Amino acid sequence: MSFDGSAIKALLDGAVSKGALHGVSALVVDRNGPVFHHAAGEASANTMFRNASMTKAVATTAALQLVEQGLLGLDATVESILPEFGRLQVLDGFDGDKPRLRPPASKATVRQLMTHTGGFGYFFLDEKLLRYHEVTGEPNVLSGFRRSLSVPLANDPGTVWAYGVNTDWLGLVVEKLSGKTLAAYLQEHVYGPLGMTDSTFTPNSEQRARLLRVMQRQADGSLAPSPLDLPATSEWDAAGHGSYGTVQDYGRFVQAWLNDGKGILKPETVQLALQNHLGQAKLPELLKSTVPVLSNDVPTPPFPQGWGLGFHLALVDLPGMRSAGTGDWAGVFNTYYWIDRSKGIGGVLMTQVLPFFDLPVVETLIGFEMAVYQQVGAALPAA
């Protein structure tokens, strides 16, 4: 594909020059590899980024490999693999400052972990869980302490879509069944085969030196260094948020998914994963933030969408943008990707800004995607 990226370069350079972003990197891939890359501001060609929740799709891919091998069933209960999971209770509310807990009405399944219907939440998106941490002093999932995964469920499994630590537990499933740490498993079965040479849960000093610093959006719209970061060490390989890497590395992962899973999955697994698996659970109209320094409120876009095995899905074509069936997600430091198998194109845009869903970044992301599809449209032969 011949790809003129001049409009995207101008967009990214402009976002930096007007002070909206301190550093940003964008990559476009088709089934054959990268067709465009540009980094601006403090980001350069080999800058490292905190992938945060973009880790989830990679960890889910590992679990899907185990499904292909017959080692893992999508509808197996999580506690049948990890007995400690069976001890988790649902947080119903509080009697004064005492958490009110009860057993879940049903047992969470592996599929529910992949679709965020396993009953979990995140403290920064759930008032009950935020209060639970406040009254008990238990560490939250961004602390690096493994016991943070044992906080109660926020809902009964299968009842609602709620964003939370589902994928962290899925990573523990992968570790239990493979007999390896998640980092070692991914190195052997995803990072290695795809040439994702900078992807890691434990950046070395050279990689840390390439890590873009985190900036915090201020009330006046300017950026200042953020006091918030991922912990320097973690007691587990956090499948929900713990990996680091370059834009190019993540582009190799996107390319594999565009390419029917080439190198990591079978085509039928890719097709299965990018179908809507939500069932009766509905996506909320708004993800309401309880910790504004970490995330803004995130409105659900006004078009039909669903959730596959590890990915948010657009269920309709968006004019001038992605196609129906496109998988996507993001990370809390304002990193984003999409995988459009219908048009054979994917994009990755990364910066390191808090809070999540930062308006200047979102505007840049939308401009990036629209510029990509103007090029894709120009490159496609007329029907």
Image: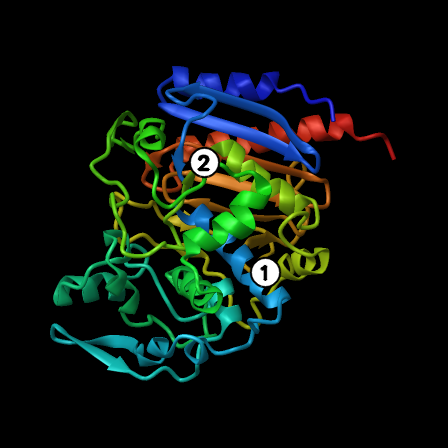
Residue 340 seen anywhere in this rendered image of the structure: no
Q: Is residue 263 left or right of residue 133?
A: right
Residue 298 versus residue 320 in the image, above or below: below
- Dividing the picture into quadrants, the one containing residue 27 is top right
Q: Secondary structure at mark 1?
A: helix
Tell which circle, 2 or 1, labels the residue nearer the N-terminal end: 1
Q: Residues within 10 Å of mark 1 (few under 14, many from 20)?
A: some
Q: Is residue 164 left or right of residue 281?
A: left
Q: Secondary structure at mark 2?
A: loop
Image quadrant occupied by the C terminus: top right
- Residue under circle 1? 65
Residue 235 screen position, x and y as percent: 27, 56
Residue depicted at 27% across the width and 51% down the height: 234
Residue 201 seen anywhere in this rendered image of the structure: yes
Q: Is residue 73 left or right of residue 42?
A: right
Residue 1 screen position, x and y as percent: 74, 27
Disc 1 marks a residue whose amino acid type is Gln
- Residue under circle 2? 198
Mark pair 2, 1: CA separation: 22 Å
Q: Nearer the viewer, residue 145 or 332?
A: 145
